[in-house]
Image: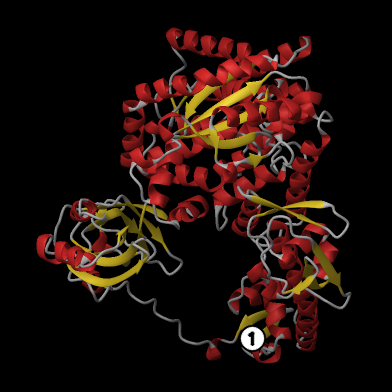
Amino acid sequence: MTSVPPNTEEEKKIIRRAYRGLLRSIKSKMDGKDKEDVRKAYELAVDAHSKQRRKSGEPYILHPIEVARICAAEIGLGPTAVISALLHDVVEDTDITLKQIEEQFGAKIAMIVDGLTKFKNLDALSPQAENFKKVLSTLAKDVRVVLIKMADRLHNMRTLGSMPRHKQLKIASETNYIYAPLAHRLGLYNMKTEFQDLVMKILEPENFQFVKHKLKETKRDRNQYINEFLKPLEQKLNTIGMPYRISGRPKSISSIYNKIKTKGVAFEEIYDLFAIRIIVDVPIPREKEICWKVYTIVTETNIPIPERLKDWITTPKGNGYESLHTTVIGPQGRYVEVQIRSERMHEIAEKGFAAHWKYKGVKQNSFDVFSDWLDSIREILENPVGDAVEFLNDFRTNLYKEEIYVFTPRGDKRVLPKGATALDFAFGIHTEVGYHCKSVKVNNILVPLGTVLNNGDQVQVITNKAQKPSEGWLKFVVTGKARSKIRSSMKEERRKKGELGKEELMRKMKNIKADFELNADMLVKHLGFTNRPDLYYAIFKEELNAQQALKAFRVEGGRLFLIEDDKPEPEIPAKTPAPAKTRRRRDFKGKPELMIDNKPAAQFKHSLATCCHPVQGDPVFAYVTAMGEAKIHRHTCPNAEHLMANYAYRMMKAEWVDSGNTDFLANLLITGIDGRGVAQKITGIITMDLKLDMRSISMDGNQGFFQGRIGIVVKNRDQLQLAIQTLKNLDGVHSVIRED
């Protein structure tokens, strides 16, 4: 954002046009005061942002107007959210104060705007995590803060093209790490899908354009097929006597590419590129009956695949999503996914959490599932333990995509993330039950606390008041609530023990007439501890002898001063290793030809990350570790999302210099039809035709199928892509995938 002269007349017309579009998008009923406040908020924001522009050069005010429009049109929020969205940046970026907001619009609007305002001059381990923690902390008060933040991020992602590449990567990684899962958990499916597609467009632009182009190429054939599929179906649907509508839509680009990548298949081999959605306009009491009637018609017209039936009408998802999903075999033997739902269910699927308030009390069970999740989030928010990164990771574990349903001995249903253990269940019942969980029975069989639960399990928790959480419990719980509560208990136990260490230190200082409060923080710093509790705990554990530590000081006026004679000579900081001495892997002949922060990489201590094995030509970034080493990661590295979302301030721009003097290791997963000599053919192509060295090879064949893992040494990404394509063209090879 930059400061510039006020908006021109032409720009003022564009701003007024955008505002009129915003007003048209508000579907909620507004009284006279609502209309007046929306207008006041608009005028205040226009004036406050009048000399500011976005990186694209457009007037900055267009951003809050569009965020407000997304809140109204795409999430379904009302005037309070619209006003807050219009004002969401004024406190952070202009001279307007929170007090002025409260005076003009009331405490509720001020609280929401405050929740959306980032901390300034934040000195923290992870500023991003601290700011997001602030947003999430308002979830217990008003979920609209999070929803407006989601709309803000969506507009930023839609207009990311004008930002520098390194900022695009940071924002995209943050989005994938927290915003997309949060959108899913709040039931905002359209937003989640768009987030994922926009992230892929930034992180994997070539693959994004490839799938997009393929979808465009096949659009005509796809539409013809949908019409062919619907023709006999519509004739039968007309007999149910209820209004309905049908839409056919392609799967999202990111979803299609994930299938290409995980299943190792070509675009043409993906059978469910699109889905058919049947939405019936039916009274709420008859929703279930009519939806199943439609299902019967669909499965009578086409052959169903029974294992692909998913009934989220009888048992809604944890975010309130309701729908019947099935897959049938349509004309030409192609698989077609069909989704069946009512108009009410569709609105909840599109608008997520916001739509629940409209139907609250209509279908109580659905809303209660959502409320249970919110309650679990509030527990984490009300009892935060550890730093903001730890908090954010705990919160993220509650944004699970897949869930299981387990039952208490009395038949009460509990929703847990897939992979949850018996101990997670205990904490899910109640914190005290988790704290004192001694043993667990699953389906009347005694099992370890870390046993992973399955759908439909009945779980009985046996407690003992003498039982307390141990650090080992953290290894086999997955829910944010369980992790947060265990850490909280461990911290409390550590604090109690630390109090004994504190008492000992106070006695020793009193004996030498040193004031405790005047000197405690100095001792913490001098002895190399992070905080006072760590110092006290070290004394309790006898890792530090308080009396010995105090011998290095003399006392004057109650203050401690180091005894100069006994003070060790100051250490001379180690010199930065000379560029030529940069450590490298033994297997490789040369150093990577890189630029880091627009400077030769030789000026930095650096190495290639072993988690993703970047090769020359891969889009990469540098992450500065706590030890000051720059680790070079691929943009698509499994760890990139976490690093960029939580530690963006440690990121540095990195790019390859055109050079072929370096060798890189790349790992390939090859699958295909097993046969005599298949391993020999593959190795022959690699070593003889492509003239590449192999570092490792393992091949397994089973019942006509083989899977092989081969490590090859390449000069750059182009050479790697040539190797992959050449191996794909070999008879019998089904897929070749680069592994991290």
**Judging from the image, what secondary structure is the residue with disc 1 in?**
strand
Where is 380 relative to 147, above or below?
A: below
Front residue (pair 335, 296): 296
Number of residues whose C-alpha sits closer than 10 Å to that of mark 1, classed few (under 14), some (14–19) or many (20 or more): some
Residue 367 falls left or right of residue 193: right
Front residue (pair 346, 660): 346
Front residue (pair 339, 718): 339
Q: Position of residue 363 (x, y in %)?
A: 81, 32
Camera sees residue 132: yes
What's under tag 1, amino acid-wise? Phe
Residue 49 falls left or right of residue 58: right
Q: Quadrant of the C terminus?
A: bottom left
Where is 6 relative to 309, above or below?
A: above
Camera sees residue 358: no
- The residue shown at (51%, 42%) is 175
Q: Position of residue 351 (x, y in %)?
A: 65, 28
Front residue (pair 706, 738): 706
- The residue shown at (63%, 37%) is 117
Where is 5 relative to 482, above or below?
A: above
Q: How is the image coloured?
A: secondary structure
Label total for image: 1
The residue tagged 1 is 553
